[in-house]
Amino acid sequence: MKKNVNRIMVQITIAFLVLFLAACGNQTQTSSTKESPKTAEAAGGKELETIKVRFTHNLPTSHHVALGAEKFAELVKEKSNGKIEVSVFPSGQLFDDKSTPEAISTGSVEMGTSLVSGWAGSIPATDLFNLPLFHSYDAVHKGLEAGISDVFNTEFNKYNSHVLAWMDYGFGYMASKDEALSTAEAYKGKRIRVPSPIVARYVQLLGGTPVSIGGGEVIPSLQRGTIDSASSGITSYVSRHYYEYTDYFTGPDLFAIFPIVVNLDWWNSLSDDARAILEEAGAEAQVWVAAEAQKADEEALVVLEEKGMKFEKRQVDSFKEVDDQIIKEFIDTTGETGKKLVDIAKSIPQ
């Protein structure tokens, strides 16, 4: 009888120890899970998805904005450990500048970049940078940070698109023969190549005749005398040899910028981790391109000076009446969105 009692007591003790150890094990496991959520996620949860992305643009591969697209792709690959692969298609291989906005918004391509005012058909407010509101790179960057980027994204979202980053192309200047277009008076009677409808309207208000032609047609037109002046970036003055056919350049008078835009449906389908990687890479590429743009401008200025082109700064006060008029017309066209953008731009010290 006593032996049976002892046997029962041993069995009870063993059972108690088993339960105690099991409880400790569960507590340890719970503690471990709380301390290392990433380990748990890797063991049985989500890993960063493998993503292949097509990036379209129409610029030559040597241009600093095109190099910025390649830089962005490299950064994405590095930050995602190769899980996100961005394939860049330059020089219009997939879509040209005119078709890129529609291609992105309809999902024909996931991502791309083109001149922001190329979106003006759907988003009239993207003509903002063609207005005489910005006179330095710093002013542009501060304007974007002060809310311009957010306002634009609200508008882009309406067209199933999302702006990921901004890449500086650079300031536009006026190259001219015989006299510098540094005052409003100098524009009168001049035939001037313009890059967009709003710039054409600006030239009309100044008493000039706008001529809408492609960049490749400028030099032949200067040679034939069918234009007297042309609006473009000074890096183009070097690459297209403007200095052989014009004597002066003045400015800056407008700013060219290329947003990296993604299809919004595609963007929303990504995980938070994937979006964070793309945003971080976009921010770093934006800074890299800004530095390259300013470096390219500085190098171009040296070349143009060596080639004999003379620079005259735009006399801002001389243009005030026409500047106010073109800005008013922009706000009339774009409504509250345009007014909000202009107010932000005007609040930035130049």
Image: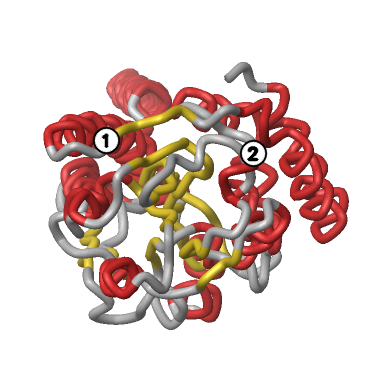
Q: Is residue 23 visible?
A: yes
Name the image quarter holding residue 316. Answer: top right
Q: Which residue is mark 2?
A: 148
Residue 40 located left or right of residue 338:
left
Q: CA distance from mark 2 to mark 1?
A: 24 Å
- What's the amino acid at mark 1? Asp
Whole-percent x, y for residue 72 in the image: 26, 48
Q: Which residue is mark 1?
A: 297
Q: Nearer the viewer, residue 90 or 138?
A: 138
Dot 2, crowdedness within 10 Å: few (<14), some or many (≥20)? Answer: many
Q: Is residue 67 visible?
A: no
Circle 2: element type: helix
Residue 337 located left or right of residue 73:
right
Whole-percent x, y for residue 126 in the image: 62, 56
Dot 1, crowdedness within 10 Å: few (<14), some or many (≥20)? Answer: some
Tag nearer the camera, 2 or 1: 1
First reached walking from the N terminus: tag 2 or tag 1: 2
Q: Which mark is residue 336?
A: none
Please give the name of the residue rendered at 36% of the width and 70% of the height, measured from the top-left corner.
Answer: 225
Please give the name of the residue rendered at 43% of the width and 37% of the height, measured from the top-left corner.
Answer: 250
The colouring scheme, among rainbow, by chain, secondary structure or one colour, is secondary structure
Please give the name of the residue rendered at 57% of the width and 27% of the height, measured from the top-left corner.
Answer: 315
Whole-percent x, y for residue 161 in the image: 57, 64
Name the image quarter holding residue 162. Answer: bottom right
The quarter of the picture where the N terminus appears is top left
Q: Nearer the viewer, residue 229 or 214?
A: 229
